[in-house]
Amino acid sequence: MAILQRECEILSHEQLSGTTWRIELSAKDIACLVQPGQFIHLRIPEFEEHILRRPFSVFQADSNTHVIRIVYRVVGEGTRRMTELACGDTVDIMGPIGNGWHLPNGARRVLIIGAGVGAAPVYELAKQGQNNGMDVTVVLGAQTHAELVFEKPYLDLGVDVICATDDGSYGFAGFCTDAALEAVDAAKTAGEPFDYCAVCGPYPVMRIAASFCREKGIPCEVSMERRMACGIGACLSCVLDTTDGKKRSCVDGPVFDANEVKW
Amino acid sequence: MVEMGQVSLHVDIAGLHMKNPVTVGSGTFAAGREYSDFIDVSKLGAVTTKGVSLHGWPGNDGTRIAETPSGMLNSIGLQNPGVDHLMEEDLPWLNERGATIIVNVAGHSVDEYAQVIERLENASLDAYEVNISCPNVDGGGMSFGADPALASEVISACRSRTNRPLIAKLTPNVTDITLIAKAVQDAGADAVSLINTVCGMAIDANTRRSILARGIGGLSGPAIKPIALGMVWQCYKAIDIPIIGMGGIRSGLDAVEFLLAGARAVSVGTANFIDPCAAMQVIEGIERYCVDQGVSDVNELVGALEW
Ligand SMILES: Cc1cc2nc3c(=O)[nH]c(=O)nc-3n(C[C@H](O)[C@H](O)[C@H](O)COP(=O)(O)OP(=O)(O)OC[C@H]3O[C@@H](n4cnc5c(N)ncnc54)[C@H](O)[C@@H]3O)c2cc1C
Ligand SMILES: Cc1cc2nc3c(=O)[nH]c(=O)nc-3n(C[C@H](O)[C@H](O)[C@H](O)COP(=O)(O)O)c2cc1C
Ligand code: FES
């Protein structure tokens, strides 16, 4: 599948919480091609001293309006500079890139775990499951209620949403992996176990979820983050150890079968 | 008056005919396939492939890269699937597209370099670039390129296996690069390419850890351009064989600076990560410079630095 490079106009840019922002781009044909779980490789304008692009997963894509949205957390100099971008500015992006989620055709009950901004790359997957008549449960995790910025878009989709906050300020008090495990056990007891799980978030969240899914026999996929240079599979900067040797997380991932990852 | 399209861009590197003076930095372009959405590889002066060893190497553990001011550190460790894979998968693909091919060769021993070239003698390709300069592998790599006697041993062994154009790729991590350049010239190299990456380190003060898993890596990108230019100029004065210059080239003007310092061709490396079309932009920029300066043949620029 071809990777495109496009100059894209920023249509809107909004701060969602203290550290989280949502940016809306007129992404032309990229918006039509992007599959759930894929990402774009973005060059931050007027940031010359920083030469590398920054990878961001696509949160929402609309093939009719050609709009894509990404949600990003400010963690360093690049993302801080991004907050200064204004509507009407243009950014150079490459995409869509990577191997996305593989929602099994026959799945009936789908569990999606999105911790922090990890809730962004699973939105289109939840929508796909919902549109295919699957029973979708989304567990959202954040440190505090204020940082829990994804509840509304998921509720609007009509999927089941379970929120967990580390500080107990909203929803389930504790880690989202504990909330997810409860949901897994409840589903099993009710005789309708999950038959697919997708996880995106910090490494420990994915490792814990991958581990209980393996124990319970639920097929599980995870989206791995690695530092990237080219973003198109050429430089081998982003490799990940798998049971099948080293793989490039940009084009062989970022989504991997959890059993394939050497945790 | 010269116009776009009329400038003669062809250069000859000791029998390696390049339709323009621009190739790509080994290891930044794989074997071209990944860039085919963006670039027609036959339009490049040459494609230089990722370093290849006899049976392949797994490369280093991650984290393998770090962004640094105007540059990046890498510690890929020459991960490659081996020469047979290159011959079966990559060279046919490049040949089908009519690309000019420089194969970058790596080894842990003098014998391994020679054996890789022996294997490749049956394949269709245009030149070898012998990497005696990688800072990221234990044994071989840079240790060969940092000692004139060892460098000349590797190049002699390769020379005895091939009549094709043989380019020695030099490391900047030495006290006097002209000594190595002269040694490989005497050992039979037809050309030199320089520079490979500059040794360096990045540390995260908050975690008190090295960002690269191996600690030391190789610095590339605009940050190293002045080092590279200086070394090209020093070598140009010291040796008679052609030079392929590289290190931080992003634009046509960057490339012209290397030509003026004495390079006959240039490589675009890290800039491919900034923009996958960078190499094409460099070619166009060189041509544009020639038009603006009334230069009808790019070879006129080689070593044309004025005082
Ligand atoms: C496939 C993929 C999808 C991603 N999707 C999102 C998303 O939807 N929302 C979001 O907020 N973040 C996402 N990230 C993480 C995002 O790329 C980093 O937060 C961002 O690159 C940090 O840049 P910086 O300049 O602010 O940080 P700095 O720390 O200043 O950056 C220094 C270097 O490290 C790299 N880097 C730092 N943190 C990461 C990281 N976690 N992953 C990869 N590279 C990193 C940077 O790209 C840069 O090269 C994703 C990462 C990957 C690999
Ligand atoms: C990720 C990466 C991988 C590289 N791999 C190789 C390699 O396999 N063989 C080699 O001779 N040089 C290798 N190099 C060095 C480049 O070919 C080039 O000499 C160097 O990066 C300087 O040029 P630049 O600043 O334009 O990148 C690599 C550089 C980078 C950044
Ligand atoms: S980032 Fe270059 S291979 Fe993945």
Image (cartoon, coloured by chain):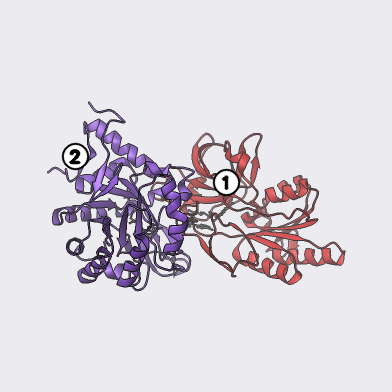
- The residue beneath circle 1 is A1
Vertical arrangement, residue A170 with respect to residue A46, above or below: below
Q: Amino acid at mark 1?
A: Met
Relative to residue A135, is residue A11 drawn left or right? left
Q: Residue at x 20, y 71 (%)?
A: B149
Vertical arrangement, residue B5 with respect to residue B45, above or below: above
| Secondary structure of residue under mark 2 | helix
Q: Quadrant of the N terminus of chain B?
A: top left
Determine the image quadrant of residue A173. Answer: bottom right
- The residue beneath circle 2 is B300
Relative to residue B80, is residue A33 drawn left or right? right
Vertical arrangement, residue A42 with respect to residue B58, above or below: above
Relative to residue A51, is residue B197 drawn left or right? left
Q: Position of residue B84 (x, y in %)?
A: 44, 63
Callout 1 crowding tier (Cα within 10 Å): few <14, some 14–19, many ≥20:
few
Regarding residue B200, the answer to whether it shows in the image is no
Q: Position of residue B129 (x, y in %)?
A: 31, 58
Q: Amino acid at mark 2?
A: Glu
Determine the image quadrant of residue B133. Answer: bottom left
Vertical arrangement, residue A162 with respect to residue A85, above or below: below
Residue situated furthest top in the rendering: B1
Relative to residue A193, is residue B228 drawn left or right? left
| Secondary structure of residue under mark 1 | loop
Pinpoint the chain carrying mark 2: B
Q: Nearer the viewer, residue B190 or B265?
A: B190
